[in-house]
Amino acid sequence: MEIGEEMNKKTWTARHVGVPALWMLGALLCLSGCNRETDQKTEAKAVRVSVVGASTIAPLISELAKAYEREHPGIRIEVQAGGSARGIMDVRSGTAVLGMVSRELKPEEQDLQHALIAKDGIGMIVNKSNPITGLTKEQVVGIYTGRITNWKDVGGDDSPITVVSKAEGRSTLEIFSGFFGIPYKDIRAHVIIGDNQQGIQTVAGSPAAVGYVSIGSAEYEADQGAAIRLIPLGDQIPSTAAVASGEYAISRDLNLVYKAPLTEPVQDFLAFARSNEAAAFVTRMYFIPVTK
Amino acid sequence: MRRFHVFGFDVRDFVWTFVMYGLTLTAVAMLLWPLLTVFGNGLQVLSWDFLLASPEDAGRSGGIAPILVSTLGIVLVSLTAALPLAFGVAVMLTEGFNPAGWPATILRCSLDILAGIPSVVFGLFGLSLFCRQLELGYSILAGGLTLACMILPTLARSLAFSLESAGVAHRAGGAALGLSKQSVLWHVMVPVALPGICAGVVLALTRALAETAVLLFTSGYSDRMPESVLDSGRSVSVHIYDLSTNVPGGTLNAYGSALALLLLLALLSFTVHALTRWMQRRMTGNTTRSL
């Protein structure tokens, strides 16, 4: 046992703490040092453009970026997803050149320039087995504030309504609550979902559910056989065509924001993102190209 | 207590056996359900082409080659960074400090607290330290280092635990032979503890591979083949997340990627086990020669 005690007594000295500390400090310095070196190297190689923002738009811009890079080898467009708010923040701080924002700019965000690249409409969906033919604006407000709780009150079967709404922070929720004039805190939802796909799956799997999702993805999923149906809101019939022509009111703008002035390569990419060539990519992501 | 017998069987025994089987089956079914879903859907798309091609059309067609490369890069960076640090911490905990003293207690306590912190917090920390402060940007290096911070506490604790359970007897025996503390550690303790260390590494690997939130913040979203560790690279879990949430019609390829992730995990843990066995043979071999 003496040996064990002897070994335990040999505890830490300056050497034990100092050496690892120095090693870590060295590693950190090395990291930041080598980073600066390679930065200069890559700058000579290609112009880097960083695009940060809404995860809704990120897949679209990634595809546009790849197509653009194929024709312009000197540019490398880095797309990062992190939400509209992050896009605004990073463009303001200069971390990103372009920001993706899946809504109209707010009044306090007018210090930034924006370019509309596509639109996305939001439509009310119900399960395919639901006989309802449409809802009025007042009925939707009633359902989402908890005043109407049964489908028979709006002309449907006698079954309690399952209300599906979006999680806070989603632009779809912002647009929904803005259009119908319901503050977030007044929404009485049974299921809170994160994204369109989840919303469609939820409504497809529950016969008495009602939800709101992006029209593009709802049309696509319905074509693929998902058990959902887009329903008219009052006299407004939800369809990608109606959103494109501006007839359908609940839609959102998908914007790229930036701080003027832009460098020439970035301006060129921005022009590409709004061209007819880009419209094909927009449609493939089930968004609606902006008609000029 | 009275016992009821029917045809010579004890009823209570019978009922409890039944309950135990039921519970076991439930647990197995809970595991099998997601596995079967992933296999059933994923096998339709998984092929060599899928593993070796680049994603196209936002991941709805094409493959996941760049994403696999980025994932391996991230995991490699995080293990390279975390393993030596965790080993150092574990050695200090078991050999350096007095296990009952205050430095060891504080260290152990802070490791436990760190291990309980939600991963998003590590993501934000990595974003501000590695991406912003150290100017690494969204990169595989930044993602790997952030993951290293995240797995460090669990890894250090499991390494310390396996070193501890190697026992006093081995240590005292080594000391009785007049070996220095370093050679007892290297030639006796580490080989004995290797299986435990290996299990710890595999656990850390699993946590790292499953991580989405941290990597979305730090290693980013780019699905291109990374040219260096300073490029942004999407990990498989981020790819699955993006396909199943932001890309309409991406579900099938999401399942394919999930299956690829499962296979990658199996392959990596098999490699770690094989490596451990090889190291154990080599290290104990060295001991006999040096003695």
Image (cartoon, coloured by chain):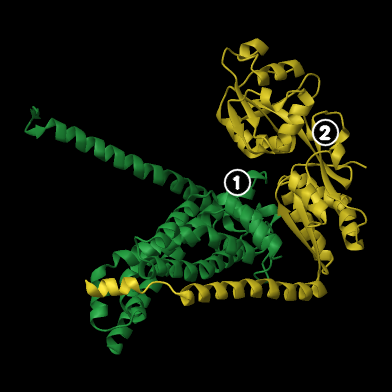
**Which chain did the renderer colour green?**
B
Residue under label 2 = A243
**Viewer can see residue A280:** yes
In the orientation shown, which residue stands out farthest toward the left? Answer: B8
Q: Secondary structure at mark 2?
A: helix
Q: Secondary structure at mark 1?
A: helix
- Residue B224: x percent and y percent? 69, 63
- Residue B18: x percent and y percent? 22, 36
Residue under label 1 = B251
Mark 1–mark 2 Cα distance, whole angstroms, equals: 26 Å
Q: Quadrant of residue B67?
A: bottom right
Q: Are marks 1 and 2 on the same chain?
A: no
**Which chain did the renderer colour yellow?**
A
- Residue A142: x percent and y percent? 69, 16
- Residue A64: x percent and y percent? 79, 55
Report the side of A70 relative to B213 (left or right): right
